[in-house]
Amino acid sequence: MKKMICAAAALCLSAAPAFAATKILFVGNSFTFGAHSSINHTFTDQVHDLNPPDAMGRTVGGVPAIFKEFTKEAGLDYDVSLETVGGKGFDFHYAEKRAVLDKPWDVVVGHGYSTMDEAHPGDPALLISSTKQIADMFHAKNPNVKFYLLATWTRADKVYPADAPAPWKGTPVKLMAQDVQKGYEAAAKNAGSEVAGVIPMGVAWNMGIDQGSIDGNPYDDAGASKMNLWAYDNYHASSFGYYLEAALDFGKVTGKDPMMLAPKGKDHMAEDLGISPIQQQQLLKLAHDALAAQGQTFVAMAN
């Protein structure tokens, strides 16, 4: 009998896969699901949307689906899931979505509300406390989980319009992203080793403005020859912006240089999203530069 059990066990072991895919979760809001862009409900077969389909029977692909395509193009194996609710931060996800989030993920990428606190714009206190709370949850299920925070971008609608509210009305366009970056860095510091790092999305956006490839003011006509990373509401990102976000996620999470996706024919996502080869190069270079400025060194790809 024991021999039969051992034989069966050996059979099971021999049939087991050589390795398991890295299980990654994206948790966020419209900045993750790609509001006002073509990526929202496309490429959905590549990812697991943890929320039920909408009234039209659609699930979400968003930025996580672009990330998944990047990893496939790089020969990496990631099992990608996402949980997103528009206009919500970590406090909501922890309180209302814990049943689907509280699992042993290998990697988590997440962000809070665009102003850090909807009720108190610019105040990082809620982001700091809720980051720690949700980080503790992920860490309890898997002490080795790598939890990355995505520091989001300046909302032009909070800067330029005459009726824009405090605290960023009339300030330099890069300031909001700088404040948000500081807020996420404070949240990461407060959570300690339970946060693996901060993905500098707003910083990369600002770098593009400085370098002249990105339009810094969508309310005038001066940047017509540049990429507009904002969507039509000057709040969410355009396909350009979400492509940059996915490239930053790819570089930070995998350790691979986003520029490896640049050679012609290597990445089909840019073409699918209407991004020209020159624009693709510029966006991938921004992702590379922003991560390198953090001190990240990239892992070489195996031949």
Image: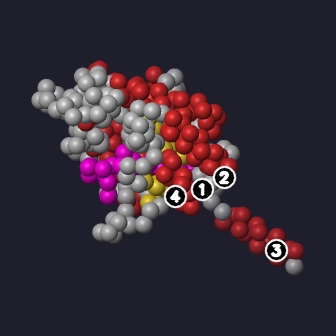
Disc 1 marks a residue whose amino acid type is Asp
Precedes in sequence: disc 2 or disc 1: 1
Residue drawn at 76 percent across, 67 percent down: 10
Mark 3 or 2, which is nearer the eye?
Answer: 2
Name the residue located 14 percent from the left edge and 29 percent from the top edge: 220
The nearer-to-camera label among 3 and 1 is: 1
Secondary structure beneath label 4: loop
> Marks 2 and 4, Cα distance to the nearest angstrom?
15 Å
Image marks 2 and 1: residues in contact by CB distance under 8 Å: yes
Of residues 50 and 160, the one nearer the viewer is 160
Disc 2 versus disc 4: nearer the observer: 4
Given the image, on which type of amino acid does mark 3 rest?
A: Ile
- In the rendered image, which residue does mark 4 sit on? 97
**Alpha carbon distance from label 3 to label 1:** 34 Å
Residue linked to disc 1: 102
Question: Disc 3 marks which residue?
Answer: 5
Residue at the farthest left position? 221
Give neighbour class at mark 2: few <14, some 14-19, many 20+ (Cα, 10 Å): some
Q: CA distance from mark 3 to mark 2?
A: 31 Å
In the image, which residues are magenta? 22-41
The residue tagged with tag 1: helix, strand or loop?
A: loop
Q: Earlier in the sequence, mark 3 or mark 2?
A: 3
Q: CA distance from mark 2 to mark 1?
A: 7 Å
Name of the residue lying farthest toward the bottom: 1
Secondary structure of the residue carrying numbered label 3: helix
| Tag in front: 4 or 3 | 4
First reached walking from the N terminus: tag 3 or tag 1: 3
Q: Quadrant of residue 274?
A: top left
Check whether the beta carbons of the residues at disc 3 and disc 1 lie within 8 A of each other.
Answer: no
